Image (cartoon, helix red, strand yellow):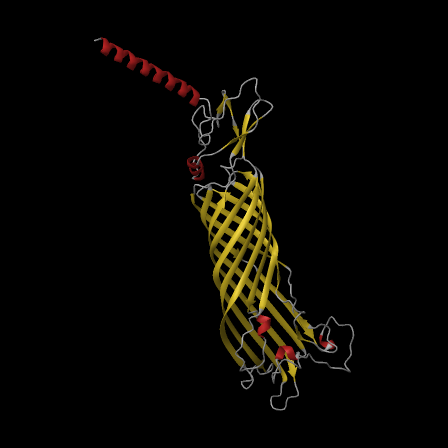
């Protein structure tokens, strides 16, 4: 009996010690923040000890929940909502920025195109002509287009990186220019000098006509229209890091504010890209006269139509870095691509009698050629963003795009009927500014 009583006393004593320890542990667990990082215990501030800014790590589960667009609701008494009964104001935070199921970017883009690295292409010239028939390497200058991006959030990994698929379209603008030249001063109403003693003609340089038997040399006037259309389509898989832990700041009023912690983020993307570069050139020569005995021209009108299409498709990789904060961010992104270029050209030369409308069947010809080549693409952009709201940002930036090994319409001018070659050494360079909005929902 005495032995049983002693065992019972020892059991009750041990039970009392366990209950006391559990009560003390529960009181200790009530002190740190709910949602603090694993193993972190952030004590409640006392009246005698000032509390500095405190970084609040966000757990993976909470970040994923916020990324899915759910409201930032914390249980009553959590550190994000209350501290000693005072509400914490939630400003722009790292968890609320750029979150949602979907996102889009809509931008107006103004770009300048440069396409010829050598001197200005000279198509025709004369001794006394008012102007030469030329094409400018950066004419017409600025041209507007639109860039649109639609992205879908996939998931957030354990390293706090967002994974997404996005589709980007750039296009809608067309770069066009024209030029005209008059050989006979009398025929140009803008000329104030009447010199009928000389009746000059326009001469096509040998580097343009490639020593063809019948060209537009001998024309009295000439006009050329050159148009270039550029469109780009991208489908990318993107992985980007996010800002780190938010911080809590106490205002002079004693109120706590939760703000984003400024820092660097990084982005990596890989995907496929398709570029459509299509060009048209329409060259007309009027009142052509030559001294070729076998194929004489006496007042005929010549027309040279050229159409080139570059269907450029391949893979690209990109890397970007950004410095962001609660309201502003500045980012840069570089893309490199190795793409296959499927080139198709069509051209036709016709000579027509202006009186009867009959065409010279002995001189007219047309060519259709096709070739493949590898094209390199480089793109670089710098973009600044201002967060109007956590899910709405205004953006503006500067962009560069360089594409090699393309077939450009002016480079295909060739008056040799049996020449089936394609000039595919043209490089095009686009650069300009953009502005628009980012949306997350």
* Image position of 258 with respect to 285: above or below: above
Q: Measuring 62% from the left and 71% from the top, which residue is drawn there? A: 224
Q: How many marks?
A: 0
Q: Percent from the top left, x then y, of residue 62?
A: 43, 35
Q: Nearer the viewer, residue 111 or 380?
A: 380
Q: Quadrant of residue 101?
A: top left
From this viewpoint, which residue is outermost toward the bottom?
A: 293
> Toward which corner of the image does residue 416 lie, by quadrant?
bottom right
Above or below — where is 70 with respect to 384? above
Please indicate, yes or no, whether residue 211 appears anywhere in the rendered image. yes
Residue drawn where x is 61% and y is 69% of the image: 225
Task: Tell me where residue 265 appears, x and y as whole percent.
Answer: 53, 43
Which residue is most to the left?
Answer: 1
Task: Say if residue 441 shows up in the picture.
Answer: no
Judge from the rendering whether residue 29 lies leftward or rightward of residue 351; answer left or right.
left
Front residue (pair 307, 395): 395
Q: Is residue 261 left or right of residue 222?
A: left
Q: Which residue is at the far front?
A: 3
Expressed as whole percent of the image width and height from the top left, the position of residue 371 reads 49, 72
Please identify the quadrant where the N terminus is shown.
Answer: top left
Residue at image coords 64%, 82%:
288
Q: Quadrant of residue 304?
A: bottom right
């Amino acid at each position: 009996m005495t032995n049983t009583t002693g065992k019972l006393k020892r059991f009750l004593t041990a039970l009392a010690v366990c209950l006391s320890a559990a009560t003390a542990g529960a009181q200790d667990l009530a002190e740190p923040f709910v949602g603090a990082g694993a193993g972190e215990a952030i004590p409640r501030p006392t009246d005698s000890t000032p509390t500095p800014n405190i970084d609040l790590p966000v757990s993976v589960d909470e970040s994923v929940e916020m990324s899915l667009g759910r409201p930032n609701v914390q249980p009553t008494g959590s550190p994000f909502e209350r501290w000693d009964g005072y509400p914490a104001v939630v400003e722009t935070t790292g968890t609320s920025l750029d979150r949602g199921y979907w996102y889009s970017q809509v931008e107006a883009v103004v770009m300048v195109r440069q396409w010829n690295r050598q001197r200005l292409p000279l198509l025709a010239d004369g001794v006394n002509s008012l102007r030469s028939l030329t094409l400018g390497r950066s004419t017409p200058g600025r041209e507007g287009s639109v860039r649109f991006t639609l992205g879908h959030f996939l998931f957030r990994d354990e390293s706090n990186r967002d994974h997404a698929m996005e589709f980007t379209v750039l296009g809608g603008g067309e770069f066009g220019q024209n030029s005209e030249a008059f050989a006979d001063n009398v025929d140009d109403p803008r000329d104030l000098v009447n010199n009928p003693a000389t009746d000059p003609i326009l001469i096509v340089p040998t580097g343009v006509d490639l020593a063809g038997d019948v060209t537009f040399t001998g024309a009295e006037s000439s006009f050329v229209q050159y148009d270039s259309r550029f469109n780009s389509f991208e489908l990318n898989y993107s992985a980007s890091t996010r800002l780190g832990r938010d911080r809590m700041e106490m205002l002079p009023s004693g109120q706590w504010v939760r703000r984003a912690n400024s820092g660097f983020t990084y982005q990596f993307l890989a995907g496929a890209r398709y570029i459509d570069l299509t060009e048209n050139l329409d060259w007309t020569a009027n009142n052509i006269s030559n001294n070729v005995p076998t194929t004489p021209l006496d007042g005929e009108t010549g027309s040279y139509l050229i159409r080139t299409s570059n269907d450029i498709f391949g893979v690209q990789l990109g890397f970007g870095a950004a410095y962001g904060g609660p309201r502003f961010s500045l980012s840069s992104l570089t893309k490199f691509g190795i793409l296959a270029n499927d080139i198709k050209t069509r051209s036709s030369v016709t000579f027509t009698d202006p009186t009867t409308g009959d065409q010279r069947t002995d001189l007219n010809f047309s060519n259709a050629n096709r070739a493949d080549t590898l094209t390199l693409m480089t793109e670089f952009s710098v973009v600044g963003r201002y967060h109007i709201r956590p899910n709405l940002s205004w953006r503006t930036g500067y962009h560069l795009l360089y594409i090699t090994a393309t077939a450009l319409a002016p480079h295909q001018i060739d008056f040799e009927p049996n020449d089936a070659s394609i000039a595919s050494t043209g490089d095009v360079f686009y650069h300009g500014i953009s502005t628009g909005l980012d949306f997350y929902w």
